[in-house]
Every structure is written in structure tokens, then in C-alpha cells.
Image (spheres, coloured by chain):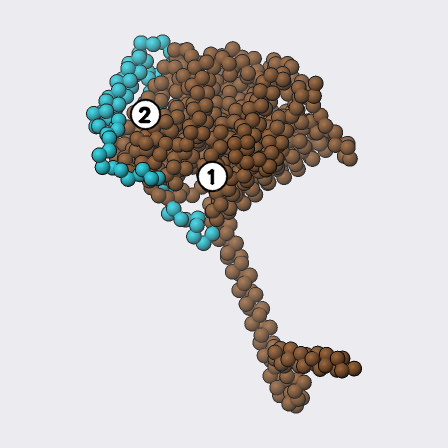
Amino acid sequence: MADANNSNNEKTYLFDKPRNVTLLLRTLYVICAGLFIADFFVHRHTVHAWEEFPAFYAIYGFVGCVLLVLVAKVLRKFVMRKEDYYDVDE
Amino acid sequence: MWMSSLPPFIPFFIAAALVLVTRGPLRSLVLVAAPLLGLLHLWFDVQPQVSMVAAETLITAPGLSYTIGAFGYTLEFMRVDKLSMLFGYLFHIAALMAVIYALHIKDTIQQIAGLLYAGSALGAIFAGDLITLFIFWEILALTSVFLVWARRTERAIKTGIRYLIFQVLSGVLLLAGAIVYFDTTGTLDFNYIGLEGLAGWLIFIAFGIKAAFPLLHGWLVDAYPEATETGSVFLSAFSTKLAIYTLARGYPGTELLIYIGGAMACFPIFYAVIENDLRKVLTYSMINQLGFMVVGVGIGTALALNGTVAHAFAHVIYKSLLFMSMGAVLYRVGNINGSDLGGLYKTMPWTATFCIIGAASISAFPLFSGFVAKSMIMSATLEGEHFITWLMLLFAAAGVFHHAGIKIPYFAFFHHDSGLRPAEAPNNMLIAMAIAAFLCIAIGVQPQYLYALLPWQVDYWPYDLSHVLTQLQLLFFSALAFVWLNKQGMYPPELRSVNIDIEWLYRKLLPASGHIAVKAMSDFNTFLLSMAQRYLDGCKSLIRTNSLSRYHLAESWPTGSMVLWIGVILGAYLVVNALI
């Protein structure tokens, strides 16, 4: 694009300031803490016994995602190929 | 009045013909008018007569039929009930967004292909019998491949051929299944089929290819990321959701679908985490979303089926939105690899905002469309006591937020600054994205209007304290996991790479074994030739030793001298002829 290289005197954008990134992350931490604590005060409607485990959904979400990424990294060892893998000798 | 049941594919097919003879603004008008007028016609003129009472009984209003004289077979083009109507509305909305999104392109082939594709999807939705369904199934395959080919690269052409093979195979299985079905039941009406007998299985696999069942999903992850930026928006809306519709009509309550759906919801998210091409990430997350719907069909209760079709409705809109935002980036930047993008929010703030709305919807944040639909399927799974499946879906729900909700916007628009400063997307793209974003929020905030359209009668309301709290916990702690993994440096970086999937079988293994076979054959051929050569050499040496070989006749003459002598004879003939 024509206006691609005007990096001199460029205005600072929202997340160019580290302060804003920190603020965003802190907001996330506070919300997570709030949701975790809320679990002990709100009576949740449950169907299955596992759901009654304190903060079940929070823990499941966190552990699930960490496992997802760790397993995906292992998967990468098996399935990752160079970008032109299918282009050569097809 | 005949207008009251005009089959919805007709306006699209007429518009496709009109595109051929129009230019400029008039053509744009035709493109937008077809889905818009079609939608208004469907909304005001066509009424499903009876709502459904129980999941098992789909009461169908009498539709419009055409008799094809020579064969005496009646094709039912217009089966109107709440199930087909819901998908009818949905496909009109999707087509409208897609044509607006594609208004800037001047490629006639793509415009015609897009209209015919959307039209044939509608034709299939309202098809009342298996032969009509088959006809539109095949038109759908043949027209959609042009959206891949329109990229006009060698790669896209090869991909398109592979895509077409799978689509046509699906059609052939459907036709074979229909014939066997007619043989055993004596009817071709498309209603509940079930997995009994050969016919049931043939049709099931035909639908399964289109729905991207595990191991049959290769064509999807192969072709959709290879289509043009506007083509993938069309593609993302119709084919797979048509398959969900046909499964919901033909196979509700088929237990096998619960396990297939669970697998579909889970396995693609691992691929999505490590995939670099962001449109391919979206394709994997599409299989994940289809998995939820397939589970819903498998459970087959009224709540589950309502959840399935509601999810299909929400899904088409937010998936289009995500494909549109990634298409806009591809259009402006020229590539869509996570490894090469970043920081685009600075110059494409609107696209980034719309993308985040789509991401929030696919992640099922409360107040966005995914939430009001997906919670129905989750509730139905839990109520049906499919506990393991429920855990898998819950994992998939956290995973989809991780890879589609966070990864897509994060790597495209935020992350590190790539230094790219592309212009904001063209206005028509922004308008289409705005419509989709509006619908995502509107459905999420006011779900009662969508619920009123659902085929089965169910009292369900997603916004209660437990539901909202648990969903927020799941999502925010998934986000926390993303942040934590990034801070620990454990998050896999975006790398320029491809990941081999099922298509490896026919893109590498099959060609490789083909090469081996060809080589073996050519070796055999060389062997035969050398044998023949030796035989001929033997003959030659025999002739040389023969006393006759002294004479000229036994030699071969060069062709040149022969042509010369023919020339001389003809010339002489001409001279003699002239003299006499």
C-alpha cells in the first residue's frame, strides 16, 4: 500500500504505551479473581456432580487451555513441515 | 397465487444470468437485489403452515411441485416447514452479506459462481425429495469450485480439482443411496432416513463428506483457505451448513453422531493452535463448531435440535464476519500468515473491531450470538447424560476461545508491530462486516426473535446467573491461560510452515505410491524395449549376412530423397499435361 512506510513521526497508538497493556492485563486479573471468588458466594444451578466442585469451570478452562497448547506443541513435532512441502514434487 | 411459493433459488439463477448482460452499477444492483428481494419474498409471502410439536414429527406444508413430463417424476422444489424456512432466511442473509462484501471485485466469473452457489444451496434446502436434493447438491459442487479457481494460481487450480473430486464423490454417493432407498422403501421423499441398511449408510456418508466428518474433512482445510478473499466468505456459509440441515432432517437422534461430533469439536483445535495461515485457523475452528451441531443432531431431543439449528444460524453470521475480516487483511496486505502480520489495528481499526465482535461471538461470550445458541446444545448434552461428550464440548468451547477468539485477532491486529500500515478495508467490505457484527450482537442481546423461528417448541432462556457465571469463568480463565503461557514463553510461536493432516494421504502418499508404480511400469517398459531392440539387432545382423542385402531395394531410403523423387515425378506429370 502507498502509505505503508511513514514510520517517522508516526502517532502513538493505543497499545504503544506499555502502561495501557499493563492496565489491560490487570483488568483481566481482577475480573478473573472476581469470578473465582464469586463462585463461593453464588449458588450455581448444577446438573452433574462434578459441576459442584468449587470453581470447576474456571479450573477446567485454565487447565484445559494449558494442556491444549502443550499437546499442540508436541503435535507440531510430528506434523510440521516446510511451507513448500506440498509444492515440491507434487 | 403462484408467487406465494416461488422456489428461492430462481431469483438467484435469474440474477446470475443478468450479471452476464449488465455492467457497473446496474450489475451491483442486480447482485444485491437477488438476496434482498428473495429474503423479503420469503419473509412476507411464504408461511410455514404448522409449527412442530415434537422432535420426531416434522409436519410439512404442501409445497410446490413440478412434473418433468418425459420421466413422469415429480421434483418437489418447495418443501416449506420451520426447519427449511430457518435455513432459508439464514442463507439469504449470508448471501446478502457476501455479495455486498464482494461488490468491489470486477470478476464476472466469481459473481456468477457466487450467485449460483448461494442459489443452489437454497434449492437444496427447500428440496422435498432426494433427486431434487441431488441435483442441487451437484450444482453446488460445480459452482463453488470456481470460487477457488478464481484465485487463478496453479496451486488454487490443483486445490480446486481435489475439492471437486470430494464434492462429486459426495454427490455420487447421495445418488446411489437415493436409488437404493427407492428400491427398499418405494419412495424418494426426503424425511427421516436413519442408519438402516445400505441406503442409510450411503446417504449418511454423502452428508458426512459435506459436513467434514473426521477423516473426510481434508477437502475443507485444503480448499477454503485457498479460495479468493471474497470466495471464502461465500464458501464458509453454505456447503457445510447445508450438510448440517440434511443431517438434522435425515438423521436426528442417531447416536453415532454424538461421538463423531465430539471428535470434530476436539481434534481441530490442536491444529488451529499451531496453524500459521489464519484463514486455515478459521477453517479448523469451523470443523470444531460443526462438531457442536453434529452432537446436537445426534442427541436429537427438541432442545438439542433447536440448539443445532440456532447454532448454525449464529455460526454462519459470525463465521462470515471472521472470514470477511481476514479477507480484508488479505486484500490489503497480500498475505494472511500470522507470522507476517501484527499491529494492524493501527490503520485498520474498524476491521479489527468487527473481527473482535466475531471472535467474541464464536467464543460464546454472553451478549453475543454464539452464547445463546451453544448453551442450548451444552444443556441438552448434560440433560441427555452424555457426560464425557459434555466434558469434550466444554474443552472445545474453551479451546475455540483460545484459538479463534484470541489467536485470530491477536496475531493479525495486535501482537508485535509488523511495520505494515495498510489502508482500512474498502467501504463495501466494512458495510458487510457491520451488518454481520450488528446481527451477532442483536441475536446475543435479543435471542427471543431467533428462538421464535426455531422449528421445535421449547422453553429455553440462556440468561440465568449460573449459566452466565460459569461461561464467564470458563472464558476468562482460558484468556488467563493464554496470557500466562505467553508470559512464560511457552506459547508456540507462529512459524512459516504447513502442518500435515489427512490430505497428506492423497497429496503425498498416493502420488508417491503412484510414482513408484509408474517407475515400476516404466522400468518394465524399458526392459521390454531392450528385449525388442536385441531381437531387431539380431534380425539386422541376419539380413547383413544375407546375399540379397547388396541390392538397393533392401536398404531403407531417406525420406528426403523420396519426397524429392515424388516432386520430380509430379513436376514431370505437370509439364507433360501442359504440353498435351
Local secondary structure at mark 1: loop
- The hue of chain A in the figure is cyan
Q: Which residue: 70% across, 21% down?
A: B2
- The hue of chain B in the figure is brown
Comparing B159 with B383, the one in front is B159
Comparing B374 with B94, the one in front is B94
**Residue at numbered disc 1:** B228
Local secondary structure at mark 2: helix
The quadrant where residue A77 appears: top left
In the rendered view, tell whether residue B252 sits above or below residue B49.
Answer: below
Residue type indicated by callout 2 = Ala
Cα gap from disc 1 to disc 2, whole angstroms: 32 Å
Query: Circle 2 marks a residue in which chain?
Result: B
Residue type indicated by callout 1 = Thr
The quadrant where residue B128 appears: top right
Q: Which residue: 65% across, 87% down?
A: B552
Q: Which residue: 50% across, 57% down?
A: B516
Image quadrant where one finds the N terminus of chain B: top right
**Residue at numbered disc 2:** B479
Q: Which residue: 66% across, 36% down?
A: B175
In the rendered view, tell whether residue B534 sits above or below residue B103.
Answer: below
Comparing A80 with B572, the one in front is B572
Name the side, left or right, on which B488 lies relative to B533.
left
In the rendered view, tell whether residue B449 sits above or below residue B159.
Answer: above
Name the side, left or right, on which A87 lies relative to B133.
left
Q: Position of residue A82 (x, y in %)?
A: 37, 47
Q: Position of residue A16 (x, y in %)?
A: 24, 30
Name the side, left or right, on which B418 lies relative to B26.
left
